[in-house]
Image (spheres, helix red, strand yellow):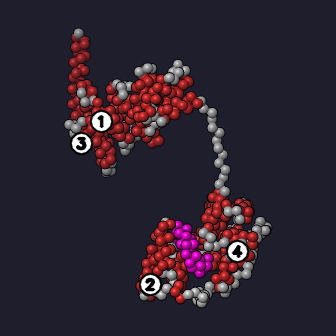
Amino acid sequence: ESERRTLDLVGGRIEDVDLSGLDAIVEEAEDEGDDHSEGVDDEETKVDLNEMDPSLPVSHIETPKISGQDLKLMMLAFMEQLPWLINRDLIDKAALDFVTNLNTRNNRKKLCQMMLEQYRNRLDLLPFYGRLVATLEPVMPDLALELSHALLQQFRAAVQNKKKQRVDWKIRCARFISELVKFGIIPKGEGLSCLRMVLFDFRGHNIDMCCAIVDAMGQFLYRSTDSHGKMKILLGVMMKKRDRVSDPRQQMLIDNAFYTCIPPPVEEKPKSASDPFQDFIRYLISNLSRYRMEITIRCLRKLDWSDPVYANYAVQCLSNPSLPRYNNVPYLASLIAALSSCHDWIGIRVLDQTLEDIRIALEVNSPSLHQSTVLSVIFLGQLYNYSVCDSPVIFKTLYQLITFGAFDPLLDDWNDLTRIGLVCELLLVCGEYFNVGSAKKKLDCFLAYFYRYLLAKEEAFKARDIVFPKNVRFRVEEMNDYVRKDIKIPESFDEAQRIVDGIQQQYGKMVLFLLISKNTG
């Protein structure tokens, strides 16, 4: 009987929520703020837990097998562990544990008190508390009733006493009520009444509480068929009263809460009509893989390369190594080599575009281009691997990376290590082929200049008492082990400079000898 009386108090119906006159209410009036609490008697909210149905058979009443001290320790451990149960499985296990081992009147009161007063700054716990209470409610309805009434009383006191409580506590109370409404512990009508109360006097902390309610359960009430109509009216009133709010922060909160319930319509941009033949070319290159090489080569060879529109578009797609997946970039270079056997100008134009992209990246020196530059350098190395270009192109690019605008504050500042990574990536792709003949001598000569550039960067870091990044040093050592295991990296800048001076003297004598022999001849 006592539970039935209390249930009637909490059981507010949606039809009983009066929404008339919300717009006409004066902001300073506060006497009507408790309209929804008609017939609520504080004495009736007390649940008589001592009442017990005498018709229950004695066999259904289990005698406690645990001492009171042990039970108290178990409850303390349960309450300490509860704030860290932050997923559904753990909360369900905790509910089962509470029902099995801790289901006493005092423990239920302690649990209710803990959820109300402890960890008030942890808003992330409220959905899990709601799930716990909803799980326990069929077995122990008094816990849900006591918690619901305590929260509603806190809410009404917070609305009436506008500045006597912290705003974060008010927001927590509003969100907790919203979570219980979503779990069906508090009726939807009571949730709408709470929203009506804060909308009635829409100023100060009430705005924050209103936005918290709408953000937490607004979408649930708006999408429910029985509460959709009144929730829509309340949202309309909230947006009308938004114009009277002068605080930009609160205006932003209102907008965010409203669009959480009713997202703004997304206008679909009309798609520009594209040529299906161009879409087919892009599809072939984007989906390039090891198993589609043969059919892709066959389809692109059938393309009308005499048509400048399709030919230019196909070359543009072939010059973009970001279209296929990164692992399939070698197959893109192989495709270009296969097409160059029929049309030699394809490889020339793709190579020219790749070199142009690298040059532009060096001239602009924008961080937004670093990733695409690395991909272009790797693509250039793959083009050399598939004989689309010769070694002079690779060496010219390597020297360009370490000499163009070197140590210029705008192009290559002392702490900019991007070019070191580009050189390592290029040599890791194609450096293994420079092991014999003149290519080997050219690479040895370049490595001497590169190590001088590297050690000059390290000296710049040391001069400012900054540690040189180890990942860059490890990358250089990895590249050196890959292309020249027998060559050691110089330990100091002076040593690297002596090696470079020796190379310049050697080749200077050779150039001088050739000039003299040419003049005498």
Where does label 4 land, which residue? 12
Q: Are marks 1 and 4 in contact (CB under 8 Å)?
A: no
What residue is disc 1 on?
A: 450
User: Between 477 and 71, which is closer to the camera in this rendering?
Assistant: 71
Q: In terms of depth relative to the viewer, which is nearer, 16 or 251? A: 16
Residue 187 drawn at (x, y percent): 66, 72
Q: Identity of the amino acid at label 2? A: Leu
* Mark whose residue sits in front, 4 or 3: 4
Residue at numbered disc 2: 71
At label 3, which amino acid type do we have? Ser
* Residue 375 part of the magenta segment: no
Q: Is residue 15 above or below residue 430?
A: below
Up-down relation of residue 173 to residue 313 (above or below):
below
Is disc 3 surrounded by few (<14), some (14 to 19) or many (20+) residues within 10 Å? some
Q: Which residue is mark 3?
A: 492
Vertical relation: 105 (above or below) 24 = below
Q: Is residue 417 left or right of residue 98?
A: left
Q: Is residue 288 visible?
A: yes
- Mark found first going from the N terminus, 1 or 2: 2
Q: Nearer the viewer, mark 3 or mark 2?
A: 2
**Do the residues under discs 2 and 4 have CB atoms within 8 angstroms?**
no
| Mark 1 touches mark 2? (CB < 8 Å) | no
Q: Quadrant of residue 115?
A: bottom right
Residue 184 horizontal/vertical position (percent):
62, 70
Q: Residue drawn at (27%, 38%), measured in percent from left and top?
A: 482
